[in-house]
Amino acid sequence: MSVPRGQVIRTQRGLTLIELMISITIGLVVIGAVSYMYLGSKGAYRGNESQARIQEAGRFALDAITNDIRRAGGLGCGTLESVYSGSNVSVNVIPPTAGVNPIAVGSAINGAVLAVDTTSEPIPIQGLTLAPTYPQPPATAPPGWTPLPGPAYRGGDILQLQISSGWPVRVTNNPDTVNGNIQIASNAIPNSTSTAPNFNANDFVVLANCSSAAVFQTPTTPTGSPPLLSYKVGGTVPTLLQAQQLGYGLGTYSTVQHFDQVTYYLGTVPGSANAVAGSGTPSALYRYSLASGTAQEVADNVEDIDVSYGVGAGATVFKSANALTPADWPNVVSVRVSLIAVGDQLGIVSAPQTFPFHGAGTAAGAVAWTAPDTRLRQVFTVTATLRDRLQ
């Protein structure tokens, strides 16, 4: 086939420069929109993930603390005012054999002793409040506080509680004051299929009824039928009751329970070199048990804790531990706990958060707390009353 002169046959056509630029522009717009949606979704996901972790840490930590606060001071059915005599329930604390988790007078937080006042009464609650500065120096124990076996103390207030724990076990006879034994219904763990004994050697025990109580450390595991719970101290039989106690004898309507002293504090996460907040790893809330001699992690991602106390019936003003006298501690009826839970990702907030924290709800007023970085944080607060303290 011949081609007329001046005519060109085009079998292919490419893109012009304008068409190419338009195509590139449209492609960039689409890529930008997709990238924007992706980054927005990723940011929302990171924010939601941080919020979920914060909510979990804050709520779980407060649930654990308030559960123990509400048990502090509970001695069987005994209350602040005895239902039988109308007078305060008097508690006899019997020191055990020297060197075995000694019970001694303690005017401040001490992980090695059971805290009692000058009349040998257990102090249901104690605390230490530190200066509201942040971040706290790492692994620095406050004055008057014996470091507990476990993760190093890192900062924040310290709360110590003395509680009855476990199911009450019925006492079936008057105490044998000659041999130093208490006859109990059973030494099996209530409501359990376990064959392990309920009370073991060196366990702390509270023996109580509605008018009197005694706290001691049993030297042996109860055996026999019926089981006999010993309260001897180094082979000597001590006096169970104090002279000033009134009401029923301990063999009437009495029960025995486990007794423990627990301490809540913030510790450095084991294996982490980042002891100061803002350097990458938040601290965790720990619960030290004197009965077990171990500290267990309650919740991670907890960065600071503030505790204040209500003293006397109808207390409406909460005070820091530093504002209480030694005579105030036995009269604490309620506790307000605030803590800061923190996420684990930087850049969730555009600027470090600032909010009132230490002293919130107290007469002195709260102190402004500024975060050291851009991780998301939230304050959780709860108020709880000690068992049987509101008359």
Image (spheres, rainbow, N blue to C red):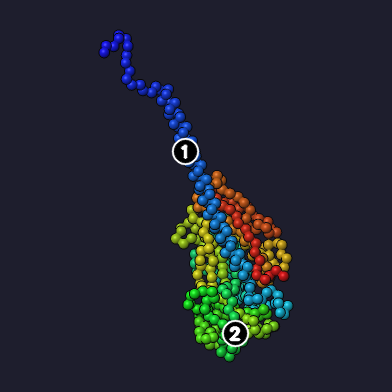
Is residue 13 something that shows in the picture?
yes
Disc 2 secondary structure class = loop
Task: Note whether 135 is above or below 249 in the view shown.
Answer: above
Q: Residues within 10 Å of mark 1 (few under 14, many from 20)?
A: few
Residue 222 image offset from top left, x and y in percent: 52, 83
State the image quarter where residue 168 is shown: bottom right
Which residue shows up at 60% across the image and 69% down it? 161
Task: Note whether 48 is above or below 88 in the view shown.
Answer: above
Task: Note whether 100 is above or below 62 in the view shown.
Answer: below
Which residue shows up at 47% across the image and 32% down it? 29
Which residue shows up at 50% across the image and 52% down it? 344
Residues at circles 2 and 1 in contact by the CB criterion of under 8 Å:
no
Q: In the image, is 79 to the left or to the right of 215?
A: right
Q: Residue furthest bottom?
A: 178
Taking depth in this image into account, of 36 and 319 the one nearest to the observer is 36
Quarter containing the C terminus: bottom right
Disc 1 secondary structure class = helix
Taking depth in this image into account, of 245 and 254 the one nearest to the observer is 254
Q: CA distance from mark 2 to mark 1?
A: 75 Å
Residue 145 image offset from top left, x and y in percent: 57, 68
Residue 31 image offset from top left, x and y in percent: 45, 35
The earlier-in-sequence mark between 2 and 1 is 1
List the residue tagged with mark 1.
Answer: 35
Which residue shows up at 65% across the image and 58% down it? 359
Q: Closer to the observer: label 2 or label 1? A: 2
Taking depth in this image into account, of 383 and 269 the one nearest to the observer is 383
Residue 9 image offset from top left, x and y in percent: 32, 16
List the residue tagged with mark 2.
Answer: 172
Q: In the image, is 11 to the left or to the right of 40?
A: left
Q: Residue furthest top?
A: 5
The three-letter code of the residue at mark 2 reads Thr
The three-letter code of the residue at mark 1 reads Ser
